[in-house]
Amino acid sequence: MVGGAQMLAGRIAEAPQFLAAYRDYRGTTAAGLDAAEAAGFDDALRRALAAATEASRRLGQD
C-alpha cells in the first residue's frame, strides 16, 4: 500500500487534483476530509502552524 505522501513525492503541484480524486470517489477518505473540514480543521491547522512558526522564531533569537 502506498500513502498519499509517497504518491505526491516530487509532484506537489498535483496535490489539488489528487485531493479532488479522493473526494469525487466519495469513499471513506472523502467522508473524513469533509468531517474534518466542517469541524474547522483548516483553521486549526493554520493556527497550529502559525504558533509553531512564532515559537521557532522566538527560540531562534535566544
Image: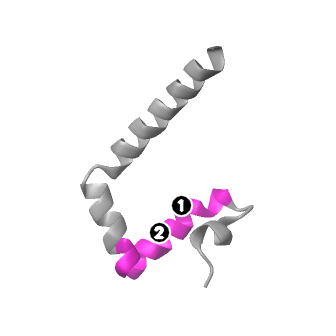
- What distance separates the C-alpha of mark 2 from that of mark 1? 6 Å
Give the amino acid type for the residue marked by disc 2 in the picture: Ala
Quarter of the image where the N terminus is located: bottom right
Spot occupied by residue 2 in the image (x, y as percentages of width and height)? 63, 80
Answer with left or right where residue 46 lies relative to residue 40: right
Question: Is residue 41 found inside the magenta-colored segment of the image?
Answer: no
Q: Are marks 2 and 1 in contact (CB under 8 Å)?
A: yes
User: Going 59% across and 74% down the picture, which residue do you hit?
Assistant: 3
Answer with left or right where residue 37 lies relative to residue 15: left
Give whichever of 48, 24 is nearer the camera: 48
Kindly indicate the quadrant of the structure image that contains residue 53.
top right
Give whichever of 19, 44 is nearer the camera: 44
Magenta-highlighted stretch: main secondary structure?
Answer: helix
Residue under pointer 2: 20
User: Going 62% across and 66% down the picture, which residue do you hit?
Assistant: 5
Spot occupied by residue 25 in the image (x, y as percentages of width and height)? 41, 81
User: Going 64% across and 21% down the picture, which residue do you hit?
Assistant: 60
Q: Secondary structure at mark 1?
A: helix
Q: Circle 1: is it few (<14), some (14-19), or many (20+) Cα within 10 Å?
A: few
Spot occupied by residue 57 in the image (x, y as percentages of width and height)? 59, 22
Q: Circle 2: is it few (<14), some (14-19), or many (20+) Cα within 10 Å?
A: few
Q: Residue furthest bottom?
A: 1
What span is colored magenta in the figure? 12-30
Q: Residue furthest top?
A: 62
Give whichever of 11, 9 is nearer the camera: 9
Colouring scheme, one of rainbow, by chain, secondary structure, one colour:
one colour
Spot occupied by residue 19 in the image (x, y as percentages of width and height)? 49, 67
Residue 8 to residue 39: above or below: below
Residue under pointer 1: 16
Give the amino acid type for the residue marked by disc 1 in the picture: Pro
Q: Secondary structure at mark 2?
A: helix
